[in-house]
């Protein structure tokens, strides 16, 4: 299994505090040693940094510590390979362009083969179940948001991919299919919103004014956000397990959430099949927040 | 205008010598200060590093010097903005996935607006003429290599994108259209081959066994490739202007070239319209190789 991290911020934010704690799980405080990656949105651009080395000893991770990129939307992942070797093409997050927006995706879980790929323009480059699932979602989005193509025959399509509620609906429907194939915790962003699904384990915390301090669970590092934050700042941090001693909210299996500018905007329930919950290596009771 | 660099290598190669000379042009020995970028293929994966800062003072460039990535196919670009601000989303190389392969593109030149976009799944994220041209080519490739979609009605399509001669043919046709819009020097790769077009200015050199030494034009640095190279090594370096004191071949306007594993495999002529040649700021006579 892997570990997920996503941040949704009202203002461009230096996220190196969260990344530091998260990267420690890549081989130092946890056993996720088969690569890692992080995607930073900067306005319309999205820069993805991936490395097949463990995060805690990755030169790319060390570089990013010395060169913090301010971002409103971040997706990160550290990998414990279940399917696909420790190769760069199998490192999350994966990225694809749809209708002039970059979309990124990271997955925690283990899916059975999806069978025949969904029709559409997106196909996996690597050999992971995760990238196959991402391409499934992207092909669904592509079909819905009728791409600018003369050959598209869909009669029930939107054209405005900026309508994040319409995006949410497509992701919800795709998740209903994909979560029957196994454990499917994920985070997905198009730079405008963060979509997060809890199949078995996911937590989040929302920081807002007046801020307090936080201490990393995975390292001897504290930050007093009150010294830095302004009333305009607001940050949602979503992670497989809590990164800090703040009061995190444990998602329930089946929660599909949408965050924007650090706020939780929408929630839906996509039931997790009983056989998936039963085979989960993670007991749901382990999801409780870590108190201060 | 901008500067292009591409490398096609028979073996995974540390290309930091060429990148060092090239990066110096990003503000130090030349005036290309509006960002830069480089894409490295590693088997099927392609990692793209871009920065809106000048290459010679970019932290990302400094990092790559200390962390050389070995690659068989590299595409790099330093930018002097003509269209689109100095923002990350406007930095080349641009990347898109098609049929499970990553494709990257970098452009030197200046195109008039292309008008209505070509039908297909690819659309620009930023505001450059270059990314619009890349999406035009990708949509042509997508239409030709009938994507896995039920709605594709093309009756004259291949399905094997590994057929680099078929890819060459599509790129040749797309170039016939695009080079009527202005100056259109480019390099494009799918990780299997390098495609390079000379609209006004492009040169290349092929290094093979027995190797000799080379000195950078843009810096006080020499490498004796004879000390390192083996008979299995072979590298083609393609650049806007020669990077070293080796004997480079100046392309003729209209040359469309395909390199694979360090060898020039194929050449076609796509005539450059007279009005484009006439408006070129670069005199063709400046293309001569720099002798040792």
Image (cartoon, coloured by chain):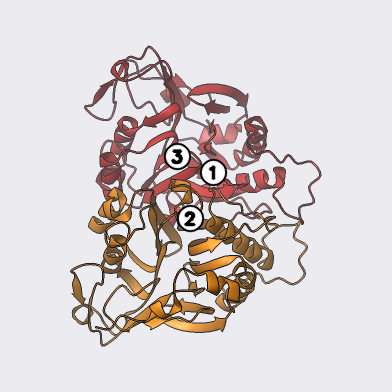
Chain colours: A red, B orange
Pick the quarter of the image with the N terminus of chain A. Answer: top left
Q: Where is residue A277 in the image (x, y as percent from the top left)?
A: 54, 32
Residue A159, quarter of picture = top right
- Residue at left offset 56%, top offset 51%: A132
At label 2, counting other C-alpha atoms closer than 10 Å, the crowd grade (few under 14, some 14-19, many 20 or more) is: some
Is residue A31 among what the camera can see?
A: yes
Q: Position of residue A5 (x, y in %)?
A: 42, 34
Write down the chain letter for disc 2: B
**SS class of the residue under badge 1?**
strand
Location of mark 1 (residue): A103
At label 1, counting other C-alpha atoms closer than 10 Å, the crowd grade (few under 14, some 14-19, many 20 or more) is: many
Question: Which residue is more in the foreground, B279 or B136?
Answer: B279
Q: Position of residue B121 (x, y in %)?
A: 65, 54
Q: In this view, does A168 lie above or below A267?
A: below
Specify whether disc 2 shares its chain with disc 1: no
Specify whether disc 2 shares its chain with disc 3: no
Q: In this view, does B56 lie above or below A281?
A: below
Numbered label attached to residue B82:
2
Q: Assess whether mark 1 and mark 2 are in contact (beta carbons under 8 angstroms).
A: no
Question: Which residue is more in the foreground, B87 or B264?
Answer: B87
Point out the tag, 3 or 1, that comes first from the N-terminus.
3
Nearer to us: label 3 or label 1: 3
- Residue at left offset 53%, top offset 67%: B183
Nearer to us: label 2 or label 1: 2
Q: In this view, does B33 lie above or below A176?
A: below
Q: Residue furthest front?
A: B278
Numbered label attached to residue A42:
3
Pick the quarter of the image with the C terminus of chain A. Answer: top left
**SS class of the residue under badge 3?**
strand
């Amino acid at each position: 299994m892997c570990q997920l991290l996503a941040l949704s911020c009202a203002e461009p934010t230096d996220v190196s505090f969260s990344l530091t704690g998260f990267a420690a799980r890549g081989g130092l405080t946890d056993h996720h040693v088969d690569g890692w990656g992080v995607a930073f949105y900067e306005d319309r651009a999205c820069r993805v940094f991936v490395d097949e080395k463990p995060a805690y000893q990755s030169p790319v991770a060390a570089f990013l510590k010395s060169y913090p990129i301010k971002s409103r939307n971040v997706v990160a992942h550290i990998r414990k390979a279940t399917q696909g070797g420790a190769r760069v093409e199998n490192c999350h997050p994966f990225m694809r362009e749809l209708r002039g927006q970059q979309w990124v995706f990271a997955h925690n879980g283990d899916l059975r083969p999806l069978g025949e790929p969904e029709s559409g323009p997106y196909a996996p480059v690597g050999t992971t179940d995760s990238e196959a699932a991402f391409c499934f979602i992207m092909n669904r989005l592509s079909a819905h948001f009728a791409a600018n193509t003369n050959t598209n025959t869909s009669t029930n399509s939107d054209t405005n991919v900026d309508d994040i509620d319409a995006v949410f609906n497509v992701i919800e429907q795709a998740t209903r299919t994909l979560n029957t194939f196994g454990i499917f915790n994920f985070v997905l962003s198009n730079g405008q919103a963060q979509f997060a699904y809890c199949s078995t384990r996911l937590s989040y915390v929302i920081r807002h004014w007046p801020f307090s301090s936080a201490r990393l669970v995975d390292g001897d590092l504290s930050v007093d956000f009150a010294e830095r934050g302004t009333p305009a700042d607001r940050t949602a941090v979503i992670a497989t397990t809590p990164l800090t001693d703040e009061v995190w909210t444990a998602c329930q299996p089946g929660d599909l959430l949408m965050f924007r500018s650090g706020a939780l905007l929408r929630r839906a329930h996509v039931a997790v099949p009983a056989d998936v919950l039963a085979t989960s290596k993670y007991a749901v009771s382990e999801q409780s927040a870590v108190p201060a």
